[in-house]
Structures are given as C-alpha cells and as structure tokens.
Image: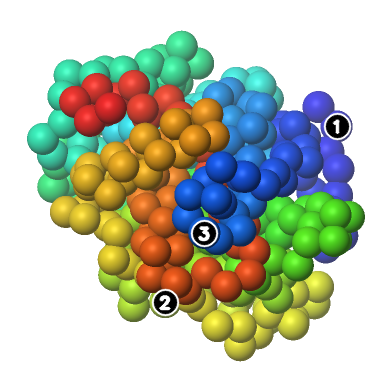
Amino acid sequence: MKDHTDTTGAARVLLAQLPTPLERLDRLSAHLGAEIWMKRDDLTGFAGGGNKVRKLEYLMAEAKAAGADTVVTAGALQSNHARQTAAAATRLGMRAVLVLTEAVAGRTAAYDRGGNLALDRLLGAEIRRLPAGSDGAAAFAETVAELEARGARVYPIPVGGSNLTGALGYARAAAEIEEQAAAIGLAPARIVTGSGSAGTQAGLVLGTAIPVLGISVASSAAELAAKVGALVAEGARSLPAFAGAAGREILVDDRFVGPGYGQPTEAMRAALQTVAELEAIFLDPVYSGKAMAGLIALAQEGRLEGPSVFLHTGGMPAIFAYDDVI
C-alpha cells in the first residue's frame, strides 16, 4: 500500500473512504428548533466505519516506517479503536495484539462476547483480557516488552490512538469540514463531538478556528480539558502548520457521562431513539449517543445559536453489545 503525505509533510496510509458526507439533519433540526448538520464519520468505510481510522492512517504509516510487524493497543472490552486497529494491521499484513480491560460493570453476555469483540475475533487479532481494576498501563507495557523479547518489532499505539500523530487525522478532518462548509455557503458556529481519549477533539482544535465542544464520555471537564489542551499545545509548538492553534479555548461539557464510561443513561438511550426515528441514523451507546444527548440538551437550553456540526464518530457495532438497553 502506497504512502501519501499531507500538508504538514506527515505520512499516511490510505484506509478511509474520504471525504465523508456533511449533511443537514432537517427533521432533527425542526424537532430541536436549531440548525443541525452531521459530519458522517460513521461512514469512513473501513472495517465498520468510525473515527479511529483517520488517526490510524497516520499511526500505521509510522508503524510501517519503523519496520514494525506487530501493533499493540489497549482499551475497554468493546473498544471501537481496538477493532479498527486490528483491521488496519490485517490490511497491512501485521499482527495485532489488543489489551482489553473489562472496565464496564453490569453488562450482559452480549457485551462480553459480541459487538466489537466479535469483529476483533473475525479479524484474527490476539485478545488479552484484563479483569476490572487491573493496571492497564502496566499490562500494556508488559505486553510490549514480552513481544519484543520474543523478537517482534512492535509499534505501540495508545488508547484511542490519541497522541499527536493520531490527532493529525482530525486536524485533516477539520480542514475537510471547512472545505465542505465553504462549498455550500455554511458558516458553522461550532463543532460538537464526543470526547474520551482526547485525540479527536484535540485534532479538530488544531485544524480549525471553529469552536469545538467536546461532550465528555468518561472524564471530568477539568481532566479532559487538560488532556486535550496538552495535545493542542504540543501540536502548536512542534508543527508550524498549527501554530495558530496556540491558546485556542478548550470547551468541554461533562454533564452527560452518567455513572461512568460505557454505562448507559436514559438521555443517551433517548438520543439514540430520537435520531434513529427522525433521521434513520444509528448512534452508538458509548460515544455518539452521549454526545447527542448533550447536543439535544444544549438545544433545549437555547444555547445553539447558528449552525452546529455534530461529528458522528461511528461505533455502531457496540449497539449489539447493549441488548438490554436498545
């Protein structure tokens, strides 16, 4: 597979089907009394779609350049990122080892075996499961060391692909949104996205001056803003193309996390139902469902003046792991 470079000179492998659509949600807009557009990164077209493939285009280019034959990443049991990492490794002829933690208590047998996990198995990934409460970072480091001791050439990928290399995928996506909006005379007042491991939101902030609101799916506003801000500062400092991002405000709303990461909320379930019934678009229970719950609440609070672009980050396979909710 031939590598390409972007405007920063960074190498990427072509995995996603881009650009993804930017479409107006007419019925949802009428329902909420606010102008809502959706950036359809559920339609990136690679191994079930979703946002992580944009990050992996850059991360896997680095892995290739390093001569890696194995990639290791980590996440929760139903990680969308782990599924797409396994797929990217398969496409490039590498081995994928997934260190997955049983981080969401009280789920059903479908969560334990189905959804993204079923796709991980189909892709031939090696899955190493950790019980709840495990030190995931230590297990990740031990896995990398063990594989290297056996002679593997390992490229480690952080949770969510959320380092500066991965964030470049969403800096590029931000430019894509700007280009699509300009072509139709749209001036977005904000971009709204689910934010967890910080890389997607940080990449957007690096790539556009449009305000980016992250709806937290796991962390407090202070914790998440610090993670996003650190990545933005690193990018603005080290990459001249993004120097203008220095000092941009990091916007986070943490009201929709509920009991914790991956734990259902009634607002999330209602958001999934509303968007499915009005627009025939499927959100996921972990990221885009909680992010849409946030967007709906902001509309109801009268806080969405001007057009809003909602970034759909994908994750539909997780719907089938939440059979007790849907």
Q: Which residue is mark 3?
A: 33
Q: Residue 283: image x %, image y %?
A: 45, 37
Residue 145 rendering spot, x and y as whole percentages: 39, 42
Q: Is residue 195 left or right of residue 19?
A: left
From the image, tell me which residue sits under label 2.
226
**Secondary-structure class at tag 1:** loop
In the image, is residue 149 above or below residue 7?
Answer: above
Mark 1 or mark 3: name the one nearer the start of the chain.
1
Q: Which residue does the image show at 22% across and 47% down from the upper left?
A: 265
Please say if 252 is above or below 132. below
Q: Nearer the viewer, residue 213 or 110?
A: 213
Q: First in sequence, mark 1 or 2: give its number.
A: 1
Q: Amino acid at mark 3?
A: Gly
User: Tag on residue 2?
Assistant: 1
Q: Quadrant of the C terminus?
A: top left
**Residue 127 or residue 187, whichever sits in front:** 187
**Visible in this render: residue 77?**
yes
Looking at the rendered structure, the kind of residue marked 1 is Lys
Relative to 22, 264 lies left or right? left
Q: CA distance from mark 1 to mark 2?
A: 36 Å
The residue lying at 32 percent from left, 67 percent from top is 254
Q: Neighbour class for label 3 at 10 Å: few (<14), some, many (≥20)?
A: some
The Cα–Cα distance between marks 2 and 3, rounded to whole angstroms, is 33 Å
Q: Nearer the viewer, mark 1 or mark 2?
A: 2
- Disc 2 and disc 3 in contact, CB within 8 angstroms: no
Front position in the image: 125 or 122:
122
Where is residue 151 drawn, in percent x and y? 50, 30
Q: Earlier in the sequence, mark 2 or mark 3?
A: 3
Please name the residue shown 55% across and 83% down the image: 249
